[in-house]
Amino acid sequence: MDLGLAGRTVLVTGASSGIGLATVRYLADEGANIVSCARDADRLVDALSTIVGLDSDRVFTGSCDVTDRAAVETFVGDAVGHFGRIDGVVCNAGRSLMARLPDTADDQIREEFDLKIFGTWNVVRAAREALAASTAGAVVNVNAILSRQPEERLAVTSAARAALLNLTHTMAGELAQDGTRVNSVLLGLIDTGQWRRRFEDSETDLDYDAWSAEIAADRGIALGRFGRAEEVAFHIVTLLSPLSSYTTGASIDVGGGVSRYL
């Protein structure tokens, strides 16, 4: 199926691994141009260079911290100058803080909200004018089921993600006047580098598949496994597509049946 993304330009944050990198692979297959930034720009360039069919003339990268508004505005302005347009934005930069509330320092709380809220809004507002000029402007915020179903083990991350979900709905209403759509993808447990690192630190005698299956059972994941990055990326790219032109303010769960909210 042609998703109508060929020749369009999409900005993806957090594209050096995991869901962001999988999203870029889909976009490359669709013929889109890619804009992406990272604090470690060399790592990002190395990651994007592994994507078959993504020519260098279809990629614009740079070093940028998404929590730094001035740096984001400069980077987005340079990207628009390079390609002449931005048609889509995927706000994927993020992490999870595995800590209960009494074990979380004040600075960690501030950092979580800074990354989830400003790390998204800085990018969207910097790209807003370009998105409005597109015939198919779209934003997808990568969030988590934690935003609706908090966990004590991820206390502050749950709260920050709830704030981001609320903000996303507000942005959907605000940017609708520009003709720009804003949606969310809500993750469950996805097999990314974070989980691989936790496995390596666990000192378990199990292999990764058995270890992750135990966690899936403990968390009540109906499908009994972690999700894959490409399973999330599929929904992100679908929401970016002009074929989703009547969808805004929506959230899609990609969690293997872990959600218990109504």
Image: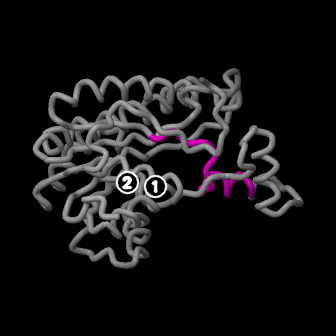
Q: Residue at x 28, y 41 (%)?
A: 123
- Disc 1/disc 2 C-alpha distance (Å): 6 Å
From what the image shows, is residue 257 above or below residue 12? above
Residue 202 x/y as whole percent: 80, 52
**Mark 1 element type:** helix
In the image, 2: left or right of 85? right
Tell me which colouring the rendered structure shows.
one colour
Q: Residue at x 75, y 49 (%)?
A: 224
Number of numbered labels in the structure image: 2
Q: Is residue 196 a member of the stretch shown in magenta? A: yes
Of the 4 image quadrants, the one containing the N terminus is: bottom left
Residue nearer the viewer, 244 or 62? 244
Residue 151 location, quadrant: top right
Name which residue type carries label 1. Answer: Ala
Residue nearer the viewer, 200 or 85? 85
Task: Identify residue for label 2.
Answer: 237
Residue nearer the viewer, 40 or 237? 237
The part of the chain drawn in magenta is 185-199
Task: Identify residue for label 1.
Answer: 233
From what the image shows, is residue 229 above or below residue 65? below
